[in-house]
Image (spheres, grey):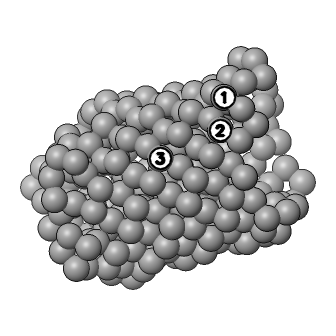
Amino acid sequence: MQITPSKTGVPFLFYLANVSVAFGHEPEPNLPFERPHSHEAVEGHAHLGWESRYFSEGRDNLDGDSLLFGSFEMGWKHLTAGIWYGSSPDQRYDEVQLTLGISEQFGDFEIYGGYTHLQFPFDGSYDNEIGGGIVWSGLPVDLECSADVYYSFDADGYFVELAMGRNFVIHDELKLNLSLPFGINQGYVADGHDGVNHIAVQLGLEWALSETLSISAHSTYSLALEKDSALPGDDSLRDFFHAGVGLQWSF
């Protein structure tokens, strides 16, 4: 489902700054929450960040305008819960995401799923989404492969994201992530084309300032695939570059 100021629709899962899902669906590091994972004890994360564009489903959803966001999430055992709020300083747009997630690990595989309630205070609309995914980390040269799918009740459609990535440890305080996400739309962007949607190259950095505080940055180039200019949902599906920065506090 497309995120525009005139209709509901926004990412469901995932991560974000290393904004990854408890929920949002873009590849790391620009999702609203971290991907759900197991916690031995109660853990919390708080994020603040800025995105040069609101990127999801291969689309420039605010037509070149930026987005400020903040999030808070808690995890215990296999459960994760979080709240995310985003607002554009350039136009009238704000959004709230409330999420619940669960995860389990089996050897080199991690599976997760969850529910997200989305509200758009600027126009009084809302949506509900469910989704899930799997990560396989048992590949050569430390590659990771992931697959995510999320379904919008409002659009009555789903979106699939496949990604291949690798993490690099530059030194103890600095980590780099390279990922190649690929998207497929099946009714999630209801007025856009179905089928292969976009492919992107994303580079992320995370620098640990202390044991509890870190900053992150990312840059992404997204390439539109099979755009249909006759469909209004494909108006914002385009080739473009965007970047973002974030601050994370863990406790």
Asked if disc 1 and disc 2 are in contact, CB closer than 8 Å, the reply is yes
Q: Residue at the top extreme?
A: 170
Q: Residues within 10 Å of mark 2 (few under 14, many from 20)?
A: some
The residue shown at (44%, 43%) is 49
Q: Is residue 104 left or right of residue 230?
A: right
Q: Residues within 10 Å of mark 3 (few under 14, many from 20)?
A: many
Q: Which residue is mark 3?
A: 48
All told, the count of numbered labels is 3
Q: Earlier in the sequence, mark 2 or mark 3?
A: 3
Q: Dot 2: what SS?
A: strand
Q: Amino acid at mark 1?
A: Leu
Inter-mark Cα distance, 1 to 2: 6 Å
**Residue 165 in picture, x, y percent from top left:** 63, 35
The residue shown at (65%, 38%) is 213
Q: Earlier in the sequence, mark 1 or mark 3?
A: 3
**Residue 44 in picture, x, y percent from top left:** 69, 58
Which label belongs to residue 213?
A: 2
Inter-mark Cα distance, 1 to 3: 15 Å
Image: 99 above or below 231: below
Q: Dot 1: what SS?
A: loop
The answer to whether residue 178 of the structure is visible from this angle is no
Image: 62 above or below 206: below
**Residue 226 in picture, x, y percent from top left:** 27, 46
Q: Amino acid at mark 3?
A: Leu
Q: Which residue is mark 1?
A: 209
Name the foreground residue: 108 vs 61: 61
Which image quadrant for residue 242?
Answer: top left
